[in-house]
Image (cartoon, coloured by chain):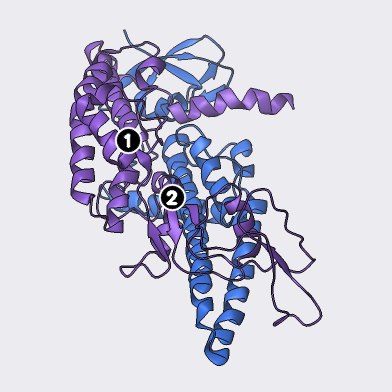
Amino acid sequence: MSEAYFRVESGALGPEENFLSLDDILMSHEKLPVRTETAMPRLGAFFLERSAGAETDNAVPQGLALLPRVECSGVIWLTAALTSQVQVIVIPQPPMWLGLQGSKLELPLWLAKGLFDNKRRILSVELPKIYQEGWRTVFSADANVVDLHKMGPHFYGFGSQLLHFDSPENADISQSLLQTFIGRFRRIMDSSQNAYNEDTSALVARLDEMERGLFQTGQKGLNDFQCWEKGQASQITASNLVQNYKKRKFPDMED
Amino acid sequence: MFCEKAMELIRELQRAPEGQLPAFNEDGLRQVLEEMKALYEQNQSDVNEAKSGGRSDLIPTIKFRHCSLLRNRRCTVAYLYDRLLRIRALRWEYGSILPNALRFHMSAEEMEWFNNYKRSLATYMRSLGGDEGLDITQDVKPPKSLYIEVRCLKDYGEFEVDDGTSVLLKKNSQHFLPRWKCEQLIRQGVLEHILS
């Protein structure tokens, strides 16, 4: 670990993310299911990719529909309904795509947060499965067995930021997050304080990012203590940063 | 999907193992700025249309693009800021002179920032401790003695000690040298501190 590099910490567990935190940026890139409440015209290629495979409301007409030639003189645009099999014929200029109302999409958290408002004029947010009733029961039964890394590597951070969407289940979600953490913490602390100089990949495999950070802090504490016990605390060492650069230098020189 | 390029920049930094500085991704940054420009221009024209043509159905689209603009801005600022934090760490770990390989990883502006930081730090250090100033990048760990035993890890050449005598630092040679002279070299990996 580099001693002089102090990264911007994640604020996701608190009320707001930290603007400059790389962890928070990565966390808010994760997706969640939303429902559009209104159409969003002119978003072209974006909806084309997003909608492949998404479900639609029955109210939306399927099949092809011709858009009236309004804004672009001399050009006719063809649109297709949001089904995965229909091809869209795109003519050179930015394709016009009418984001149909009531379609289900997966949007990243930052976008959902930006477009969300109390009156749900643009979109309404659904909870991802892992924060819903079913999984909450699993967590309350035994939190230790769950592979939180697979369930979205930012389980706690993402869950905390989800509370912004004023879901009626907010109280339950926050309780569930807290209790899950309490249930898992003991094991994390134990393993981080007792795994000295060994391969820890098996221990961290099922932890989410926040827990991994905790684990690393614990390991650092352990290593520092052992170092002090051996009397190496006063030994000046080459900084880790320097050593890492040296290791990389040889491959660079061989190029 | 918007802001993908910006996320690539962030991931690049995240991938670099603890605190290392990857090469400055000038290309990526330029692409992000281009995307921002395109988004902004589309929004400008749509806002005009919404105001004059009364097309209030464009507002969600405008908001969408605005969110993407904000996100791109956040990613670029965080990218640049995190790089500065890493460069700052270089001053403390490596010293004033950076190896060439590292210098190529920095953009011209970052190099300028590094020089300014060095100067600020030097000014500050000179202002401490009376007339001479105090080198706070030394003695990062509390010293136990004035002189220390060191072994040379690689050939470095001649090294002059305070009273004028010079020492030849050859690989595997051991010396008993004043602490303050060697600390920099130990941190750079040229010498190794031996505990008795």
CA neighbours of label 2 inside 10 A, class few (<14), some (14 to 19), many (20+): some
Rendered blue, the chain in question is B
> Could you tell which of marks 1 and 2 lies nearer the N-terminus?
2
Q: Is residue B179 visible?
A: yes
Q: In this view, does A129 lie to the left or right of A245?
A: left
Coordinates of residue A206 in the picture (x, y in percent): 37, 24
Q: Is residue A227 left or right of residue A116?
A: left
Q: Which of A50 and A187 is in front in this view?
A: A50
> Gap between marks 1 and 2, in whole Å?
23 Å
Q: Colour of chain A?
A: purple
From the image, tell me which residue sits under label 2: A33
Q: Is residue B143 visible?
A: no
- Residue sitting at 79 percent across and 76 percent down? A75
From the image, tell me which residue sits under label 1: A210
Coordinates of residue A248 in the picture (x, y in percent): 59, 26
Q: Which of A19 and A140 is in front in this view?
A: A140
Compared with A67, A246 (above or below) is above
Q: Which of B24 and B66 is in front in this view?
A: B66
Q: Which of B175 and B194 is in front in this view?
A: B194
